[in-house]
Image: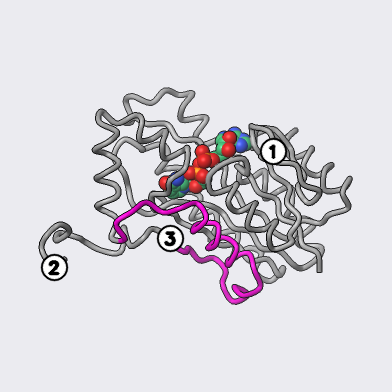
Amino acid sequence: MQQTAVITGAASGIGAATAERFLVKGINVIGVDLTPAFREDDKLGWVQGDVSKTETWTQVSEELTKREWDADILVTSAAYLAVGNVLDLTDEQWANTINVNQLGLVKAVRCVLPQMIERKHGAIVTVGSIDSYMAEQGLIAYCTSKGGILQFTRSLALDHARDGIRVNCVCPGVTDTPLFRHHLSTASDPESFLKTREQRNPIGRLLKPEEIANTIAFLASDEASGITGAQIVADGGLTTGFDFRTGEEGA
Ligand SMILES: NC(=O)c1ccc[n+]([C@@H]2O[C@H](COP(=O)([O-])OP(=O)(O)OC[C@H]3O[C@@H](n4cnc5c(N)ncnc54)[C@H](O)[C@@H]3O)[C@@H](O)[C@H]2O)c1
């Protein structure tokens, strides 16, 4: 059966790697992003717009209808990240964080879910973060929004398990994408921040967006038919436990 995936944040990083992965697997993709499509492809539809705006999702529905595609998969990768503590961040930055990271997810789900319920079939993969369950300095708004994504994922999974819809959350660790590079650029010494991030990762390096895309593709596939309401952590071991010995001989 020809499948279709709607992917937010599909122009860059993890979203783009996921779109590529699905296209290679022969899955149609509708990308949704603030920026234009990363390339032309018959199997790639595109809506350029803001995930937090209703009109964007009206256009996604129109694009699906025009192409006579039904959404089998939804991946929500678009995100906004503002750096600062609770006193630094403006109301606008908080509102953007909640609008893009949470309301954008709600609107995406509302767009595809009714039709998935009707067809008794669908896989939704939300993109959380290790910041969905751990806190990180200077990212209070982002962490708040990512924690909410995890609870949204679990609630949605329970509400629609008997409708034949699976909902899971991928929690990436530090992944080399433009979003991470933006975060890096806010550090007083980006070079040393990068080195610390690499060294503190048990695998000794940053993750690649393709590694997260592979995890997303697994959760979206029938191979994960028994998995719903779960979080899969793809972080190179970063949040597995304490690591007091890195750099010591033999560690
Ligand atoms: N890179 C990491 O280290 C990391 C770690 C944990 C979680 N994540 C999560 O992975 C997801 C993808 O991030 P990435 O690192 O690939 O970032 P990225 O910046 O490479 O890609 C994000 C994409 O989302 C789009 N986008 C942003 N706001 C949008 C909006 N309002 N409407 C539509 N599109 C919008 C951007 O244009 C961009 O193309 C995010 O949810 C992020 O929180 C990333």
Q: Secondary structure at mark 3?
A: strand
The span from disc 2 to disc 1 (Cα, nearest Å) is 47 Å
Q: Classify mark 3 as within 8 Å of ligand 1 or not, answering yes or no.
A: no
* Magenta stretch encompasses residue 230: yes
- For image coordinates 51% across by 50% down, the residue present is 149
- For image coordinates 43% across by 60% down, the residue present is 234
Magenta residues, start to end? 203-232
- Which residue is labeled 3 in the image? 234
- The amino acid type, in three-letter code, at marker 2 is Gly
Q: Secondary structure at mark 2?
A: loop
- For image coordinates 57% across by 41% down, the residue present is 12
- The amino acid type, in three-letter code, at marker 3 is Ala
Image quarter of residue 123: bottom right
- Asked if labels 3 and 2 touch by Cβ distance under 8 angstroms, the answer is no
- For image coordinates 75% across by 33% down, the residue present is 55
- Which residue is labeled 1 in the image? 37
The span from disc 2 to disc 3 (Cα, nearest Å) is 25 Å
Q: Secondary structure at mark 1?
A: loop
- Which residue is labeled 2 in the image? 250
Question: Foreground residue, 73 or 237?
Answer: 237
Image quarter of residue 54: top right
- Asked if labels 1 and 2 touch by Cβ distance under 8 angstroms, the answer is no
